[in-house]
Amino acid sequence: MFTFSVVLGIVHLHALIGQNIIYDLPKPTLALNPPYGVFLNGETINLTCGCQCPITMNRYYRNQVHIADLESPEGQCETTVGISVVDQRYDGNYTCECTLSDNGNWRYSERSEPVQIVTRDELSVPSIFMDPDSGAVSNGEMLEITCQGDIRSTGGTFYLYKDLERTTAQSQNVTGAQRSVTFTINTERKGSSGKYHCEYETQVTGRWLISPPSKDVTITVKGAGKRFLLKVGLGCTAGIIVLLFVVLACFLISKTRKTRKQNTERNEALSAGVTIQETGDNT
Protein backbone atom coordinates (compact mmCIF):
# COMPACT_ATOMS: atom_id res chain seq x y z
CA MET A 1 0.00 0.00 0.00
CA PHE A 2 2.72 2.47 1.00
CA THR A 3 4.91 1.64 -2.04
CA PHE A 4 2.06 2.38 -4.46
CA SER A 5 1.19 5.56 -2.56
CA VAL A 6 4.73 6.89 -2.62
CA VAL A 7 5.00 6.28 -6.37
CA LEU A 8 1.69 8.03 -6.84
CA GLY A 9 3.02 10.92 -4.75
CA ILE A 10 6.09 11.25 -6.98
CA VAL A 11 3.89 11.47 -10.07
CA HIS A 12 1.80 14.21 -8.48
CA LEU A 13 4.94 16.00 -7.30
CA HIS A 14 6.03 16.41 -10.90
CA ALA A 15 2.57 17.64 -11.77
CA LEU A 16 2.80 20.29 -9.06
CA ILE A 17 5.93 21.89 -10.48
CA GLY A 18 5.13 25.21 -12.07
CA GLN A 19 1.64 25.48 -10.60
CA ASN A 20 0.30 27.85 -7.95
CA ILE A 21 -0.48 26.45 -4.47
CA ILE A 22 -3.29 27.98 -2.38
CA TYR A 23 -4.00 27.03 1.24
CA ASP A 24 -7.73 27.61 1.68
CA LEU A 25 -9.43 24.19 2.05
CA PRO A 26 -11.12 23.22 5.39
CA LYS A 27 -9.08 21.30 7.92
CA PRO A 28 -9.55 17.50 7.60
CA THR A 29 -10.07 14.86 10.28
CA LEU A 30 -7.84 11.82 10.72
CA ALA A 31 -9.30 8.69 12.38
CA LEU A 32 -7.46 5.64 13.70
CA ASN A 33 -9.23 2.28 13.44
CA PRO A 34 -9.11 0.35 15.66
CA PRO A 35 -8.28 3.01 18.26
CA TYR A 36 -5.92 0.89 20.38
CA GLY A 37 -3.34 2.50 22.61
CA VAL A 38 -0.73 -0.10 21.59
CA PHE A 39 -0.49 -2.32 18.49
CA LEU A 40 1.38 -5.61 18.27
CA ASN A 41 3.22 -7.22 15.36
CA GLY A 42 0.89 -8.70 12.76
CA GLU A 43 -2.01 -6.33 13.40
CA THR A 44 -3.48 -4.02 10.75
CA ILE A 45 -4.13 -0.32 11.31
CA ASN A 46 -6.38 1.86 9.15
CA LEU A 47 -5.89 5.63 8.93
CA THR A 48 -8.84 7.46 7.33
CA CYS A 49 -8.51 11.08 6.23
CA GLY A 50 -11.86 12.83 5.82
CA CYS A 51 -12.15 16.06 3.82
CA GLN A 52 -14.84 18.43 2.59
CA CYS A 53 -15.79 17.70 -1.01
CA PRO A 54 -14.61 18.14 -3.64
CA ILE A 55 -11.01 16.90 -3.33
CA THR A 56 -8.45 15.36 -5.66
CA MET A 57 -6.19 13.48 -3.26
CA ASN A 58 -5.02 13.22 0.35
CA ARG A 59 -1.46 13.49 1.56
CA TYR A 60 -0.29 11.56 4.66
CA TYR A 61 2.58 12.44 7.01
CA ARG A 62 4.41 10.70 9.85
CA ASN A 63 6.28 12.99 12.24
CA GLN A 64 5.88 15.82 9.68
CA VAL A 65 7.52 13.73 6.93
CA HIS A 66 5.46 13.03 3.81
CA ILE A 67 4.86 9.28 3.42
CA ALA A 68 1.96 8.78 0.99
CA ASP A 69 -0.57 10.29 -1.43
CA LEU A 70 -3.92 8.70 -2.19
CA GLU A 71 -6.31 9.85 -4.90
CA SER A 72 -9.91 10.21 -3.82
CA PRO A 73 -12.47 8.20 -5.83
CA GLU A 74 -14.86 10.44 -7.73
CA GLY A 75 -17.68 11.65 -5.51
CA GLN A 76 -15.97 10.55 -2.29
CA CYS A 77 -14.28 12.79 0.24
CA GLU A 78 -12.06 10.44 2.22
CA THR A 79 -9.29 7.92 1.72
CA THR A 80 -7.91 5.16 3.92
CA VAL A 81 -4.33 3.97 4.31
CA GLY A 82 -3.82 0.43 5.62
CA ILE A 83 -0.71 -0.27 7.69
CA SER A 84 0.43 -3.79 8.54
CA VAL A 85 2.52 -3.66 11.72
CA VAL A 86 5.79 -5.58 11.49
CA ASP A 87 7.97 -3.61 13.91
CA GLN A 88 8.27 -0.24 15.61
CA ARG A 89 9.16 1.64 12.43
CA TYR A 90 5.54 2.84 12.25
CA ASP A 91 5.61 4.55 15.66
CA GLY A 92 4.88 8.26 15.54
CA ASN A 93 2.34 11.05 15.10
CA TYR A 94 0.36 10.92 11.86
CA THR A 95 -1.43 13.78 10.07
CA CYS A 96 -3.07 14.31 6.70
CA GLU A 97 -4.12 17.14 4.40
CA CYS A 98 -6.58 17.55 1.53
CA THR A 99 -5.68 18.77 -1.95
CA LEU A 100 -7.76 19.89 -4.94
CA SER A 101 -6.67 20.59 -8.52
CA ASP A 102 -8.69 23.63 -9.59
CA ASN A 103 -8.15 25.33 -12.99
CA GLY A 104 -4.42 24.80 -13.05
CA ASN A 105 -3.98 25.66 -9.35
CA TRP A 106 -3.52 23.32 -6.39
CA ARG A 107 -5.56 24.17 -3.30
CA TYR A 108 -4.47 22.73 0.06
CA SER A 109 -5.94 22.43 3.53
CA GLU A 110 -4.31 22.71 6.92
CA ARG A 111 -3.02 19.45 8.32
CA SER A 112 -5.30 17.46 10.58
CA GLU A 113 -4.82 17.05 14.30
CA PRO A 114 -2.18 14.37 14.94
CA VAL A 115 -3.04 10.74 15.67
CA GLN A 116 -0.46 8.66 17.54
CA ILE A 117 0.46 5.08 16.66
CA VAL A 118 2.39 3.04 19.23
CA THR A 119 3.71 -0.48 18.53
CA ARG A 120 5.08 -2.70 21.30
CA ASP A 121 5.67 -6.35 22.19
CA GLU A 122 2.96 -6.42 24.87
CA LEU A 123 -0.56 -5.10 25.39
CA SER A 124 -1.20 -1.62 26.72
CA VAL A 125 -1.51 -1.09 30.46
CA PRO A 126 -5.18 -0.95 31.53
CA SER A 127 -6.66 2.15 33.12
CA ILE A 128 -8.42 1.94 36.49
CA PHE A 129 -10.85 4.38 38.16
CA MET A 130 -12.89 4.42 41.39
CA ASP A 131 -16.21 5.95 42.35
CA PRO A 132 -15.83 7.74 44.70
CA ASP A 133 -12.35 8.50 43.39
CA SER A 134 -10.96 8.97 46.91
CA GLY A 135 -11.61 5.31 47.69
CA ALA A 136 -12.78 6.26 51.20
CA VAL A 137 -16.25 4.98 52.08
CA SER A 138 -18.23 4.21 55.22
CA ASN A 139 -18.81 0.62 56.20
CA GLY A 140 -21.77 -0.81 54.33
CA GLU A 141 -21.52 1.58 51.34
CA MET A 142 -20.94 0.28 47.82
CA LEU A 143 -17.85 1.30 45.84
CA GLU A 144 -17.29 0.85 42.07
CA ILE A 145 -14.01 0.13 40.28
CA THR A 146 -13.90 0.59 36.48
CA CYS A 147 -11.21 -1.00 34.30
CA GLN A 148 -10.50 -0.10 30.65
CA GLY A 149 -8.29 -1.92 28.16
CA ASP A 150 -7.64 -2.63 24.46
CA ILE A 151 -9.93 -5.64 24.09
CA ARG A 152 -9.63 -7.00 20.53
CA SER A 153 -12.55 -7.91 18.26
CA THR A 154 -12.60 -11.50 19.54
CA GLY A 155 -13.47 -10.31 23.07
CA GLY A 156 -11.71 -11.13 26.32
CA THR A 157 -11.84 -11.02 30.11
CA PHE A 158 -11.12 -8.38 32.77
CA TYR A 159 -9.70 -9.49 36.13
CA LEU A 160 -9.72 -7.56 39.40
CA TYR A 161 -7.06 -8.52 41.95
CA LYS A 162 -6.72 -7.50 45.61
CA ASP A 163 -3.35 -6.62 47.15
CA LEU A 164 -0.46 -8.63 45.70
CA GLU A 165 -2.36 -11.92 45.74
CA ARG A 166 -2.99 -13.69 42.45
CA THR A 167 -6.39 -14.80 43.70
CA THR A 168 -9.01 -13.17 41.52
CA ALA A 169 -11.34 -10.90 43.48
CA GLN A 170 -13.74 -10.64 40.51
CA SER A 171 -13.75 -11.19 36.75
CA GLN A 172 -16.00 -10.29 33.81
CA ASN A 173 -16.10 -11.55 30.21
CA VAL A 174 -16.63 -8.93 27.48
CA THR A 175 -17.26 -8.78 23.75
CA GLY A 176 -15.00 -7.06 21.24
CA ALA A 177 -17.19 -3.95 21.31
CA GLN A 178 -16.84 -3.59 25.09
CA ARG A 179 -13.53 -2.25 26.33
CA SER A 180 -14.39 -1.44 29.94
CA VAL A 181 -16.16 -3.07 32.88
CA THR A 182 -17.27 -1.93 36.32
CA PHE A 183 -16.78 -4.05 39.45
CA THR A 184 -18.88 -3.41 42.58
CA ILE A 185 -17.19 -3.78 45.98
CA ASN A 186 -19.37 -4.56 49.02
CA THR A 187 -17.57 -2.92 51.94
CA GLU A 188 -19.61 -4.88 54.50
CA ARG A 189 -17.55 -7.93 53.65
CA LYS A 190 -14.60 -8.58 55.91
CA GLY A 191 -11.27 -7.55 54.39
CA SER A 192 -12.70 -5.29 51.67
CA SER A 193 -10.15 -2.58 52.54
CA GLY A 194 -6.84 -2.70 50.70
CA LYS A 195 -5.15 -2.20 47.32
CA TYR A 196 -6.71 -3.35 44.04
CA HIS A 197 -5.47 -3.56 40.44
CA CYS A 198 -6.83 -4.99 37.20
CA GLU A 199 -5.57 -6.82 34.11
CA TYR A 200 -7.23 -7.98 30.90
CA GLU A 201 -6.82 -10.94 28.59
CA THR A 202 -7.56 -10.85 24.85
CA GLN A 203 -6.65 -12.61 21.61
CA VAL A 204 -4.14 -11.00 19.24
CA THR A 205 -3.43 -12.65 15.88
CA GLY A 206 -4.49 -16.05 17.24
CA ARG A 207 -2.65 -15.77 20.58
CA TRP A 208 -4.22 -15.18 24.00
CA LEU A 209 -2.24 -12.51 25.82
CA ILE A 210 -2.53 -10.95 29.28
CA SER A 211 -1.85 -7.26 29.79
CA PRO A 212 0.53 -5.79 32.36
CA PRO A 213 -1.17 -4.83 35.66
CA SER A 214 -2.77 -1.43 36.08
CA LYS A 215 -1.70 0.97 38.77
CA ASP A 216 -2.98 0.25 42.31
CA VAL A 217 -6.00 1.95 43.85
CA THR A 218 -6.67 1.87 47.59
CA ILE A 219 -10.01 1.31 49.30
CA THR A 220 -10.38 2.55 52.88
CA VAL A 221 -13.49 1.55 54.83
CA LYS A 222 -14.27 4.05 57.60
CA GLY A 223 -16.10 3.08 60.82
CA ALA A 224 -15.73 -0.67 60.41
CA GLY A 225 -14.58 -1.10 64.07
CA LYS A 226 -17.23 1.30 65.40
CA ARG A 227 -19.92 -0.53 63.48
CA PHE A 228 -18.77 -3.83 64.97
CA LEU A 229 -18.76 -2.39 68.50
CA LEU A 230 -22.19 -0.91 67.89
CA LYS A 231 -23.52 -4.29 66.84
CA VAL A 232 -21.95 -5.90 69.93
CA GLY A 233 -23.40 -3.20 72.18
CA LEU A 234 -26.85 -3.55 70.67
CA GLY A 235 -26.62 -7.31 71.06
CA CYS A 236 -25.66 -7.03 74.75
CA THR A 237 -28.43 -4.49 75.37
CA ALA A 238 -30.98 -6.77 73.76
CA GLY A 239 -29.70 -9.69 75.87
CA ILE A 240 -30.00 -7.68 79.07
CA ILE A 241 -33.53 -6.60 78.17
CA VAL A 242 -34.55 -10.20 77.52
CA LEU A 243 -32.93 -11.31 80.79
CA LEU A 244 -34.78 -8.60 82.75
CA PHE A 245 -38.03 -9.61 81.08
CA VAL A 246 -37.47 -13.25 82.09
CA VAL A 247 -36.63 -12.28 85.71
CA LEU A 248 -39.69 -10.03 85.89
CA ALA A 249 -41.89 -12.76 84.46
CA CYS A 250 -40.56 -15.29 86.99
CA PHE A 251 -41.12 -12.80 89.81
CA LEU A 252 -44.70 -12.14 88.74
CA ILE A 253 -45.41 -15.85 88.34
CA SER A 254 -43.93 -16.57 91.81
CA LYS A 255 -45.89 -13.75 93.41
CA THR A 256 -49.11 -14.89 91.74
CA ARG A 257 -48.59 -18.44 93.02
CA LYS A 258 -47.86 -17.16 96.55
CA THR A 259 -50.99 -15.00 96.54
CA ARG A 260 -53.10 -17.89 95.37
CA LYS A 261 -51.68 -20.11 98.14
CA GLN A 262 -52.42 -17.50 100.83
CA ASN A 263 -55.96 -17.07 99.55
CA THR A 264 -56.45 -20.82 99.58
CA GLU A 265 -55.21 -21.13 103.18
CA ARG A 266 -57.41 -18.20 104.29
CA ASN A 267 -60.44 -19.73 102.71
CA GLU A 268 -59.70 -23.07 104.35
CA ALA A 269 -59.33 -21.34 107.76
CA LEU A 270 -62.56 -19.45 107.33
CA SER A 271 -64.34 -22.62 106.35
CA ALA A 272 -63.04 -24.40 109.45
CA GLY A 273 -64.17 -21.52 111.76
CA VAL A 274 -67.70 -21.57 110.40
CA THR A 275 -67.99 -25.28 111.01
CA ILE A 276 -66.96 -25.00 114.68
CA GLN A 277 -69.44 -22.16 115.30
CA GLU A 278 -72.27 -24.12 113.77
CA THR A 279 -71.42 -27.15 115.98
CA GLY A 280 -71.55 -25.01 119.16
CA ASP A 281 -74.95 -23.57 118.23
CA ASN A 282 -76.30 -27.02 117.69
CA THR A 283 -75.05 -28.14 121.08
Image: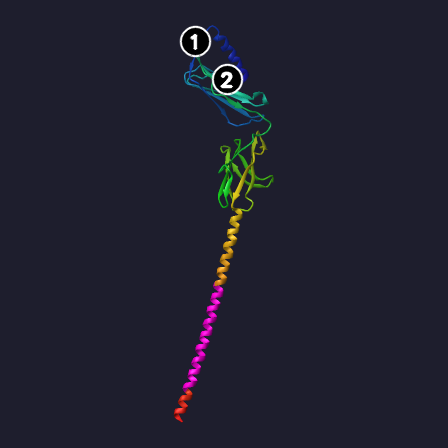
Name the residue that disc number 2 marks: 60
Q: Is residue 12 magenta?
A: no
Instruction: Classify mark 1: residues with Cα within 10 Å, few (<14), some (14-19) or many (20+).
Output: some
The residue under the point 49% across, 64% down is 246
Q: Amino acid at mark 1?
A: Asn
Q: Position of residue 67 (x, y in %)?
A: 53, 16
Q: With respect to residue 261, does 160 lie above or below?
A: above
The residue under the point 54% across, 48% down is 225
Query: Which residue is outermost to the top?
Result: 18
Q: Is residue 262 magenta?
A: yes
On-image quarter of the C terminus: bottom left
Name the residue that disc number 1 marks: 105
Q: Which residues are magenta?
A: 245-274
* Picture quadrant where residue 22 is located: top left
> Nearest the camera: 86 or 221?
221
> Nearest the camera: 208 or 89?
89
Q: With respect to residue 47, does 202 lie above or below?
A: below
